[in-house]
Image: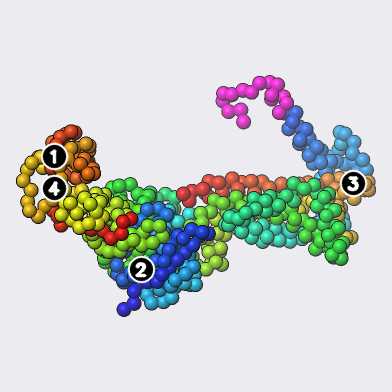
Amino acid sequence: MSSDGKTKSPVGLRISATAGLLFLHLPLFFIFLYAFTTEEKSFAFPPPGLTTKWFGVAWNSRPDIWPPLYLSLQVAAIATILALIFGTLAAAALSRSKFFGRETISLLFVLPIALPGIITGIALRSAFDIMSIPFSVWTIMLGHATFCIVVVYNNAVARFRRLSGNLVEASMDLGADGFQTFRYVILPQIGTALLAGGMLAFALSFDEVIVTTFTAGQQTTLPIWMLSELIRPRQRPVTNVVAVFVFLVTLLPILAAYYLTREGEHTGGSSK
Amino acid sequence: MSRAVRFQNVSRRFGSVRAVDGVSLDIEPGEFFALLGPSGSGKTTCLRLIAGFEQPDEGHIEIFGETAEGVPPYRRNVNTVFQDYALFPHLTVGENVAYGLMIKGVAKAEREAKAKDALALVKLAGYETRRTAQLSGGQRQRVALARALVNGPKVLLLDEPLGALDLKLREQMQEELKSLQTSLGITFVFVTHDQGEALSMANRVAIFNDGKIVQVGTPSDVYERPTTRFVADFVGSSNVLSPEFAAAHGGTSSWTSLRPERIDVVPEGATVAADCASAKGTVSVVSYQGAVTRVTVVTDKLPLIATIPAGASLHRGERVTLVWPKSAMVAMGGGA
């Protein structure tokens, strides 16, 4: 960080930057800290003692954790797959053709991520009600897919725009039909973008609460389970252990996605 | 024997623009054929019609006797060398060249051997494992050529093949393309806006203007006997004589082309042979161009341009006589 001390920022700036970082990350630190506390009922500061026993408890003697975890993984996986299919198709269609209203349609694809979750949630709930679709795992997945498509679409459309149209023609000229061209030319070039978009989508879906609340029937996803656990003061540090797990499951894909798209900027642009 | 490529009254419209407008054309097997014209004249659209990237709105296209309209590019036995080469950036040079064979399901060892041969043919032996990003413009061009030729196309299409290369490299590639075409015997169809390139490489040239073919012929046909003012102007530079001027100087009463290099500049009052025409005038511009000097002489009717061997000392304002053989005047049909 402080390389050679060549450029030193003013003291005031450094203090406010530190304060900003603390404000952002201190709450996270407490989540981690109280996963190790010996106090079970209420969180007192400082913790009376530190222990790792809650990790064992969460793993061995809390069967109520597993169904929500499986459900969340299942929902995130299906929502991501739906998003990958529809996001890629939409990006391919919109980046390859020019027509009146293209920008508007592009905006409509991106809009769900800007929309407050509560609006998406109410809208979906009413829509499912009107169509008499019973609330189930599938309605949760469809709800999640609405905002997952956006991240896949955004990643893919940026890469599609850099893909020279001539490459597709070159591939067809060399005897490849549409499917082979997608498989051997398009997919290798947008692959990292799709992987990144998919991981972001997975992370978004995995910790989603609001849309889930509106579109779920009796199902409990992991974030909903955590919310309900906070109200009941029983083995409270277990919730923190799960929180640490959720933190890792969502952070790692986002980090990976960040590195993947950054690398893509170097290799993807070298075609010309 | 069927034609390599046959266009019968082919049209292709984009909106209200007729990019290709009623073109009929026959290209013989084994020809090195140039589609020459200014940008927007329809020559590239014609190439794309042969490749299958465009479909005609009207008319009929045949490639070696087989109907081409409605057939997608991947089911045509033609291959294209793209203007920007369109090499696949995620594949190595060898994989790029072997792509077409891979799609056809040729076994790995065989396609690698064939790719190797194709690269040797374009003088890039040993480049198989390079990334395309590491190559120079000329090398990319050669890879694109090898990638097309390895499939054994019946017709090879080249879209402005030398456009992106510098002068030296362009001259070298011209010769190489020409000898490659002669030794392989494949029909080459190439698009260019460079008349020098078209004249030096092609057996025959089709000259395009406004979506139509205005003249088809051998390079010497179109250069020495242009049929319209457009061809006379576009292929090399030419003096275009009005019907009156031509008739007054021993030509026919029609628009007439007179190539600058056929005009000799002699001192005023020199005797003129019987089979030659002459005009007196004043030198207005002398432009040194290395091997030749280009002189503009204003006669009483119109300015004429003559190119004479370098070394002649002429200066502005000098009175001279222009002399040219009457046979150098080529009457053209049509005013335009």
* Category of crowding for the residue at label 1, using alpha-carbon neighbours closer than 10 angstroms: few (below 14), some (14–19), many (at least 20): many
| Alpha carbon separation for disc pair 3 and 2 | 81 Å
The residue nearer to you, when weighing A104 against B59, is B59
Q: Are marks 3 and 1 on the same chain?
A: no
Q: Give the number of the disc on residue B25.
A: 2
Residue A228 appears anywhere in the view: yes
Q: Chain of mark 4?
A: B
Asked if residue B298 is positioned above or below residue A71 in the image, the reply reads above
Real-space CA distance between mark 1 and mark 2, rounded to the nearest whole angstrom:
46 Å
Q: Residue at x 67, y 51 (%)?
A: A104
Find disc 3 in the rendering and name its residue. A230
Location of residue B292 (image quadrant):
top left
**Which quadrant, please, contains the C terminus of chain B?**
bottom left
Q: Amino acid at mark 2?
A: Leu
Q: For the magenta stretch, what is the residue range?
A: A1-17
Task: Residue B288: give x, y in percent of width and height.
Answer: 21, 38
In-front residue for pair B112/B17:
B17
Kindly identify which residue carries mark 4.
B278
- Residue drawn 22% across and 44% down? B301
Q: Amino acid at mark 1?
A: Val
**Viewer-proximal residue, A201 or A233?**
A201
As helix, strand or loop, the secondary structure at mark 3 comes to helix
Tell me the kind of residue under disc 3. Leu
Q: Which residue is mark 1?
A: B320
| C-alpha span from label 1 to label 4 | 10 Å
Q: Amino acid at mark 4?
A: Ser
Q: Are marks 1 and 2 on the same chain?
A: yes
Q: Is residue B302 magenta?
A: no
Query: In the current view of this chain or complex, which residue is farthest to the bottom?
Result: B1
Q: Residues within 10 Å of mark 3 (few under 14, many from 20)?
A: some
